[in-house]
């Protein structure tokens, strides 16, 4: 079953640079910080597979655990399938040649992606078939970003993909609040920003 557009749709942030590039006929630039594209659908009643962070650039702590906690604490009726459950199913299915880690996600860092193709699509189909997932949430990358004026923030790239079609339903690049590099609140605030955008119907 596909995902319909909710009547209570959230706003979509469209980059002015992307619009200018489209009008000029040039290729759209890589998405930048603050980007939120697509419409985050109402996931209540769905089975959503959460994958581990695919690339971590300097972020301390446990990003995977923080993301799981940040999503589950909102207590919406979503059947989250955690990475450990998927890994367990993979161990029981030696014939499935896929992994939850090291997936080819670099395309999300260089261009606006509307639909994923192989080899990533094939991996997601195989993984989701093991756990009967409707959609996949991929934390593409976490990074520690430093600025001489504002300090240090954690940046989180996240994509929500419909398994059946490979369509990217929602994508975001969001920064957390400014904290010292080793302060766990930096990661927590970035996850909170992501969860608020994805689960817009869950309240504060």
Image (cartoon, helix red, strand yellow):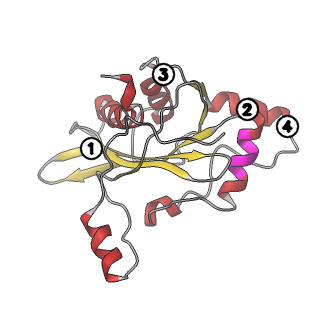
Q: Are marks 1 and 2 in contact (CB under 8 Å)?
A: no
Query: 10 Å neighbourhood of mark 4: few (<14), some, or many (≥20)?
Result: few
Q: Position of residue 59 (x, y in %)?
A: 39, 42
The extreme front residue here reads 7
Nearer-N-terminus badge (4/3)? 3
Q: Is residue 114 magenta?
A: no
Task: Give me the C-alpha separation between circle 4 and circle 2.
Answer: 11 Å
Describe the element under mark 1 as helix, strand or loop: strand
Of badges 4 and 3, nearer the viewer stands: 3
- On residue 123, the disc is none
**Quadrant of residue 71 within the rendered picture:** top left
Q: Read off the residue under disc 2.
A: 131
Q: Position of residue 87 (x, y in %)?
A: 71, 34
Q: Are marks 4 and 2 in contact (CB under 8 Å)?
A: no
Q: Read off the residue under disc 1.
A: 153
Q: Nearer the viewer, residue 173 or 181?
A: 173
Describe the element under mark 2 as helix, strand or loop: helix
Tell me the quadrant of the picture where the N terminus can be found: top right
Q: Read off the residue under disc 4.
A: 93
């Amino acid at each position: 079953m596909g995902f319909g557009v909710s009547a209570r749709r959230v706003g979509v942030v469209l980059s002015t640079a992307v619009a200018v590039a489209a009008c000029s006929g040039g290729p759209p630039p890589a998405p930048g910080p603050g980007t939120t594209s697509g419409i985050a659908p109402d996931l209540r009643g769905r089975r959503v597979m959460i994958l581990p962070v695919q690339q971590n650039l300097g972020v301390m702590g446990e990003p995977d655990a923080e993301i799981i906690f940040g999503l589950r604490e909102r207590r919406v009726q979503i059947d989250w399938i955690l990475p450990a459950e998927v890994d367990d199913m993979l161990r029981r299915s030696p014939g499935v040649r896929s992994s939850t880690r090291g997936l080819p996600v670099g395309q999300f860092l260089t261009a606006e992606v509307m639909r994923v193709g192989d080899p990533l699509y094939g991996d997601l189909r195989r993984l989701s078939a093991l756990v009967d997932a409707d959609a996949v949430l991929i934390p593409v990358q976490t990074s520690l970003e430093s600025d001489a004026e504002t300090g240090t923030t954690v940046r989180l790239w996240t994509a929500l993909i419909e398994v059946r079609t490979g369509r990217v339903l929602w994508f975001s690049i969001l920064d957390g609040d400014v904290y010292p590099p080793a302060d766990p609140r930096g990661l927590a605030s970035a996850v909170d920003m992501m969860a608020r955008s994805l689960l817009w119907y869950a309240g504060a």
